[in-house]
Amino acid sequence: MKCEIRYDEDISKLPLDDLNVYRVVYMGQNVYVRIDINGKSTYFSLIDGKVTIHSKELFNMIKDSDFDNCELTTIIDVILDEVVYYLGVKRTELFRKFDQLFERITEGQVKNVGEVKDLRKEIQTLYSDSSSLFYVAKKLSKFVSKDTLDNVAFAYERSEILITRSADLYNIYLTEVQNELNIIIKKLTSISFIFLPITAIASIYAVSYSSLPSSLDSIDTVYFLTPLIVLGIMLTLYLKKINWL
């Protein structure tokens, strides 16, 4: 069943100052409502028992909806249900993005925090939309069925879970960055470990003795370099054995 729902883009007559604070404003028999979608304010009003949509985004959601009847409570139920459905689709998409980003972070493919910030911002917008819808549904409880209230509450709870999980992305990202840094430090430490004893022995050999080689083509050069090379090879093999290299 199709019901007559008016569409009027003019919001100048709406009590915007009050709506921006209270989201649902009762003025006599008239009711004015603000719902956030993608962080953008959308409005509808109940005037003389008729529903008027004042935002194109919201009107496009419900213009093709089927109604069991054209009673006021049914129309409001459908409006809220359509918003819940939209938020549900958005939430599923964000859960998928979260899982993909989580895997990429743990595989070390994410090299900056920009993607984490962008996803976090989207999730925060969804959470804000869901929480505002939950508040609006409570304020309109006399017009809204229990099933719709339950659906709104479920949408709010799921978005709360998502935003809680998204906070872990920062910790996971920072942990991976720290792990990469630890690997670099470990490699540098290994190099130092190899050359430190060589440097120590070379320093001893640097003491002026008459038996030290005076040129590279003498047998003394072999005696001088052999222990250094052997020690370096032994230390390298040891570090490989303990998986430091």
Image: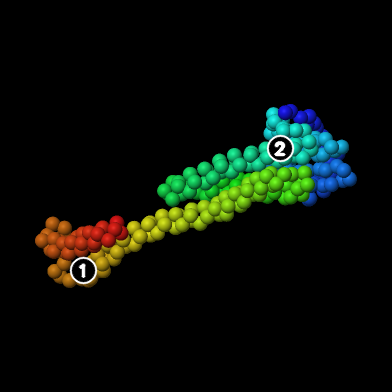
Front in this rendered view, residue 226 or 46: 46
Q: Earlier in the sequence, mark 1 or mark 2?
A: 2
Figure quadrant of residue 177: bottom left
The picture places residue 220, in percent across and down from the top left corner, at 12, 63
Marker disc for residue 205: 1
Task: Give the spatial CA distance, label 1 vs label 2.
Answer: 89 Å
Horizontal side, residue 96 vs residue 185: left or right: right
Residue depicted at x 71% and y 37%: 78
Residue depicted at x 46% and y 49%: 105
* Disc 1 secondary structure class: helix
Residue depicted at x 79% and y 50%: 22
Which corner quadrant holds the N terminus? Answer: top right
Horizontal side, residue 217 vs residue 28: left or right: left
Figure quadrant of residue 43: top right
- The image shows residue 182, relative to residue 61, as above or below, that is below
- Hey, what amino acid is under mark 2? Val
Residue 228 seen in this snapshot: no
